[in-house]
């Protein structure tokens, strides 16, 4: 008969196998979740720093407009309709308006072919 102590003993290489699996899980999280998010944030920061007058943008809140003035204090003035201006933070910019229009037009163009 088996004693309790012999049933509770782990295999000699079980600890090493757990470390390998843990390391694999960390790599999967890094390559599929952390790294793409960091690259997206880096690209957004680069776009926000390169804003200039006349760029069509979309804010995080979904407001569409054109950059009218880039201020030194980290804000920009956008024109949302002729003669109507908003002052917002650069960090509130989500994407370039023309990029969003191109993404929306691409699936429609392929569906008609």
Image (cartoon, rainbow, N blue to C red):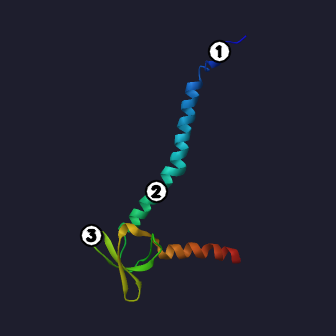
Of 112 and 85, nearer the camera is 85
Of 110 and 87, nearer the camera is 87
Q: Residue 102 in the image: x percent, y percent?
A: 55, 75
Write down the quadrant of residue 44 in the picture: bottom left
Q: Gap in Å between the C-alphas at discs 3 and 1?
A: 70 Å
* Marks 3 and 2, the one that precedes in the sequence: 2
Write down the quadrant of residue 3 in the picture: top right
Q: Check contact, mark 3 vs mark 1: CB within 8 A.
A: no
Residue 18, compared with residue 76, is above or below; it is: above
* Marks 1 and 2, the one that precedes in the sequence: 1
Q: Which mark identifies residue 73? A: 3
- Residue with the mark numbered 1: 4
Residue 105, compared with residue 7, is above or below; it is: below
Left-right relation of 80 to 25: left
Left-right relation of 86 to 36: left
Q: Residue 100 in the image: x percent, y percent?
A: 52, 73
Write down the quadrant of residue 110 in the picture: bottom right
Q: Gap in Å between the C-alphas at discs 1 and 2?
A: 52 Å
Within-10-Å neighbours for mark 1: few <14, some 14–19, many 20+: few
Determine the secondary structure under disc 1.
helix
Q: Residue at x 55, y 44 (%)?
A: 28
- Residue with the mark numbered 2: 39
Q: Residue furthest bottom?
A: 82
Q: Residue furthest left?
A: 72
């Amino acid at each position: 008969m088996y004693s309790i102590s012999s049933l509770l003993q782990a295999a000699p290489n079980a600890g090493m196998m757990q470390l390998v699996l843990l390391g694999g899980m960390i790599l999967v999280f890094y390559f599929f979740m952390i790294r793409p998010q960091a690259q997206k944030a880096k690209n957004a920061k680069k776009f926000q720093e390169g804003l200039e007058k006349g760029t069509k943008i979309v804010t995080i809140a979904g407001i569409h407009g054109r950059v009218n003035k880039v201020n030194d204090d980290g804000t920009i003035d956008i024109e949302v309709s002729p003669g109507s201006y908003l002052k917002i933070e650069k960090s509130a910019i989500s994407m370039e308006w023309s990029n969003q229009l191109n993404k929306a037009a691409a699936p429609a163009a392929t569906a008609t072919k």
